[in-house]
Amino acid sequence: MIEYYYEKEIRTLNENGIKYLVVGGVAVNLYGLQRLTRDLDLMIDLSEEHFNRFLKIMEELHYFTNVPKEKWKGVVAIAFRTQDDSDKRIDVFLRNPIDFEVAYKNRKTFETGDFKIDCVGWDDLLEMKNKADRVRDWIDVGSLQRLKELEENEKKNK
């Protein structure tokens, strides 16, 4: 599963007390809808001290971005890549699409193997997907809602 591909990065965030939420395709996978995704999308606490700690961790993990810092104020998200594995990419919102503190309180923590992953809550995931207003996100919303219906029907029939 894709979350294991990013295990080292997630463990490092956890070990360093970084407040993050997995969003996007990996979140969709964690909720049970298996679909292809290669990047790890994150919302993080954007307070200055916290964000600077996050950047230091990215550097220690050998991640870099091609977006110069002076342009960060003008973008919604930036992609971090690593030379250690050219397929790995972590996209981080610089302007969170929903209130981070509220979403963090509503988070769902998944236990995967022997590590935990803080993921955006169900309702917040659907809100973010609807706000993105892209075909891929509409498909995700419909598929997630159908999956939930199937799970609820299965529980009723037991």
Image (tube, helix red, strand yellow):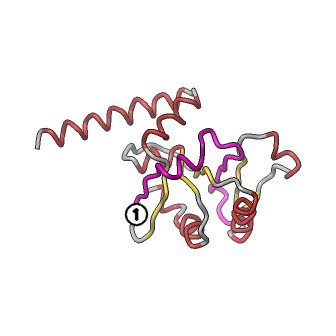
**Total labels drawn:** 1
**Image spot of residue 2 (x, y percent):** 48, 55
Q: Residues within 10 Å of mark 1 (few under 14, many from 20)?
A: few
Q: Tell whether position 102 is magenta.
A: yes
- The amino acid pointed to by label 1 is Thr
Residue behind mark 1: 112
**Quadrant holding the N terminus:** bottom left
Q: Please determine whether, in this image, residue 8 is positioned above or below residue 24.
A: below
Q: Helix, strand, or loop for circle 1? A: strand
Q: Please determine whether, in this image, residue 97 is positioned above or below residue 118.
A: above
Q: Please determine whether, in this image, residue 131 is positioned above or below residue 61.
A: above
**Quadrant holding the C terminus:** top left
Q: Is residue 156 visible?
A: yes
Q: Tell whether position 105 is magenta.
A: yes
Identity of the residue drawn at 74% across and 67% down? 56
Q: Is residue 83 visible?
A: no
Q: Please determine whether, in this image, residue 116 is positioned above or below residue 71.
A: below
Region of the chain picked out in magenta, as a range? 82-110
Q: Nearer the viewer, residue 65 or 121?
A: 121
Identity of the residue drawn at 38% across and 36% down? 144
**Image spot of residue 127 (x, y percent):** 51, 34
**Image spot of residue 29 (x, y percent):** 43, 48
In the displayed structure, does residue 136 sit left or right of residue 44?
A: left
Give the residue at the far right of this rendering. 70
Q: Nearer the viewer, residue 30 or 81?
A: 30
**Image spot of residue 60 (x, y percent):** 71, 71
